[in-house]
Image (spheres, rainbow, N blue to C red):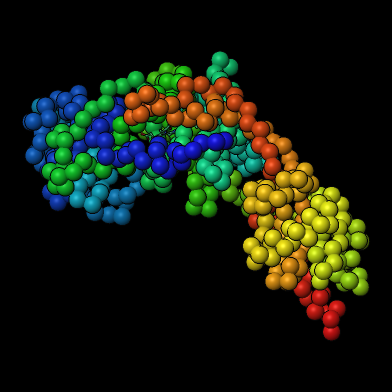
């Protein structure tokens, strides 16, 4: 794609999400002084829950609102290590003669405490057993699934059934933070996103970062009226209250429009974190408003953790298997190397081991002015020029899947050598082992034209997300299959074996 600006980190990525002073109205936010739990700020919809106007509440000790015995629960929560656990308390409130229970999420910050009130759904005991059994069942299904696309598909199907959302997607980030829908379960009348790629700016950097601080992002309806916190400035800091960890935090407009363009009303997303990195998301959509209760959300949080662990285990397994395979090919190649009088013959003449080891179309050795070729390679003169370019520009092991990008001279032979791996024998002399991979013309199916990800209005200030997610085919040229970490390691090992052999040949 040909996006001039880096919308991921610069444009969309600079929208402040946490300093908005607005919350979604499905709950009530109170900001309390951390010292004495006096009420510093309230969301303007507070009356709906607490039957009192903001003015009547500001400045009051929080304990004045609570039924007997409840204040101690909060203190206990604040003063143990559980204070960061994000598990809500069910607290009974006593306001204007009425007693009501709310589910309260206590989020301690530097100087103040966020208290998020939501309608409490006290569920009967047997529902716990049902929930527990369901989670256990899904976990065992995920353990049985074979490859990682199968695990993802299983997860999408089970989560859809479990949560009742109309569409559940498993979304995997690529190295540039674009994302690909690798699994999908959906109602028939909803758009099919399976296999489509979405540009990084759709979930920009600061939004991705928040998944490390929050177990999910819930938008029960995009059709809501945001509620202000008052007073507007936090009296302790004289700034907007930081809402990074508030689950009620109001949603960026551009994303609300995005949801409308996708024809969905509700959205919930959860992170898939592997090896401490955001690997992907579970994205749940609903055509109409949907507000899963705290228990459902927690169960989904748990399942997203189980999915992450399962994917992580599977990835480890696959990497191990690949390593074992590479090792046995390496052993074979080294035998060949030692059976030959000259290392170049050992590498290139006796069978295809080198090409197999690194999945090459062709290979070359440039050594002491001589050139050996095998398989599909550029001509001798071109290889000689390439080696002299490498001598001048690269020192260590070098691999690229877009050689024309680094070395435009290679345009003429990109069909056989869009991918290059160069293992220096003696880089200063221009001696290299070279492996070539052919061009693979790839088409990438995008969910909507990524070049239109941001629609600027003529005023140069207002903008919109793209309004169509219809498949946009991009043909990628001048590119080979990419090189994996494990292949690069195998190449480095091979290089060392060759260097040893050369030493033995000499003495
Ligand atoms: C947020 N964008 C998000 C979120 C998702 C996506 C999952 C998190 C909030 C949520 O769960 O709804 C994107 N959702 C997707 C994608 C799929 C999906 C790709 O299901 C694939 C099927 N978005 C834009 C542009 C900008 C932008 C142009 O399209 C910026 C100019 C920004 N997206 C944006 C922002 C947020 C976001 C700022 C954070 C919203 C918030 O948390 O307030």
In this rendering, the answer to whether 219 lies above or below 505 is above
Q: Is residue 214 left or right of residue 158?
A: left
Residue 305 to residue 43: above or below: below
Report the residue at 22% width, 42% height from top. Answer: 241
Q: What's the residue at 78%, 76% (across, down)?
A: 500
- Residue 406 image point, x, y percent: 64, 52
Q: Considering depth in this image, is 135 or 479 the residue closer to the camera?
A: 479
Q: Nearer the viewer, residue 117 or 89?
A: 117
Q: Is residue 155 left or right of residue 219?
A: right
Question: To which quarter of the image does residue 394 belong?
Answer: bottom right
Whether residue 275 is visible? yes
Residue 373 location (% of width, % of height) = 86, 58
User: Residue 51 in the image: x percent, y percent?
Assistant: 14, 25
Residue under the point 64% across and 62% down:
393
Residue at horizontal 12 percent and vertical 27 percent from the top = 52
Quadrant for the C terminus, please.
Answer: bottom right
Quarter for ligand 1?
Answer: top left
Q: Is residue 433 left or right of residue 284?
A: right
The quarter of the picture where the N terminus appears is top right
Which is nearer the eye, 184 or 251? 251
């Amino acid at each position: 794609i040909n996006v001039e600006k880096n919308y991921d980190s610069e444009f969309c990525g600079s929208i402040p999400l946490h300093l908005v002073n607005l919350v979604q109205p499905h709950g009530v936010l109170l900001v309390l002084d951390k010292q004495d739990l006096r009420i510093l700020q309230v969301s303007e919809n507070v009356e709906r829950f607490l039957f009192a106007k903001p003015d009547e509440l500001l400045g009051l000790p929080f304990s004045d609102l609570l039924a007997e015995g409840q204040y101690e629960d909060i203190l206990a929560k604040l003063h143990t290590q559980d204070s960061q656990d994000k598990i809500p308390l069910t607290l009974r409130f006593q306001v204007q003669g009425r007693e009501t229970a709310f589910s309260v999420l206590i989020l301690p910050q530097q100087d103040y405490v966020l208290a998020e009130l939501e309608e409490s759904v006290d569920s009967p005991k047997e529902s716990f057993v049902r929930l527990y059994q369901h989670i256990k069942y899904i976990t065992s299904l995920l353990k049985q699934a074979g490859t990682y696309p199968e695990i993802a598909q299983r997860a999408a199907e089970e989560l859809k059934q479990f949560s009742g959302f109309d569409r559940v997607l498993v979304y995997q980030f690529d190295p540039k933070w674009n994302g690909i829908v690798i699994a999908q379960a959906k109602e028939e009348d909803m758009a099919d996103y399976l296999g489509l790629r979405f540009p990084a700016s759709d979930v920009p950097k600061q939004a991705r970062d928040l998944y490390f601080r929050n177990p999910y992002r819930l938008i029960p309806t995009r059709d809501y009226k945001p509620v202000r916190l008052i007073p507007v400035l936090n009296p302790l800091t004289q700034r907007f209250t930081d809402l990074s960890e508030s689950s009620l935090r109001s949603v960026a407009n551009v994303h609300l429009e995005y949801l409308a363009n996708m024809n969905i009303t509700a959205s919930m997303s959860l992170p898939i974190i592997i090896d401490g990195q955001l690997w992907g998301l579970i994205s749940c959509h609903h055509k109409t408003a949907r507000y899963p209760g705290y228990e459902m959300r927690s169960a989904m949080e748990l399942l997203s953790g189980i999915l992450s662990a399962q994917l992580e285990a599977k990835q480890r397994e696959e990497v191990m298997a690949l390593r074992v395979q590479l090792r046995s090919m390496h052993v074979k190649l080294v035998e060949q190397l030692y059976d030959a009088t000259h290392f170049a013959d050992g590498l290139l003449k006796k069978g295809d081991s080198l090409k197999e080891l690194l999945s090459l179309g062709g290979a070359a050795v440039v050594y002491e002015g001589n050139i050996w070729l095998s398989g599909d390679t550029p001509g001798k003169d071109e290889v000689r020029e390439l080696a002299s370019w490498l001598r001048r520009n690269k020192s260590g092991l070098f691999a690229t899947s877009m050689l024309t990008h680094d070395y435009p001279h290679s345009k003429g032979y990109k069909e056989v050598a869009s991918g290059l791996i160069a293992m220096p024998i003696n880089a200063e002399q221009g001696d290299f082992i070279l492996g070539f991979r052919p061009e693979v013309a790839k088409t990438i199916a995008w969910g909507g034209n990524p070049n239109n990800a941001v629609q600027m209005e003529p005023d140069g200030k207002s903008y919109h997300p793209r309004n169509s997610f219809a498949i946009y085919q991009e043909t990628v040229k001048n590119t080979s299959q990419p090189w994996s970490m494990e292949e690069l390691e195998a190449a480095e090992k091979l290089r060392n074996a060759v260097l040893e052999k050369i030493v033995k040949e000499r003495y």
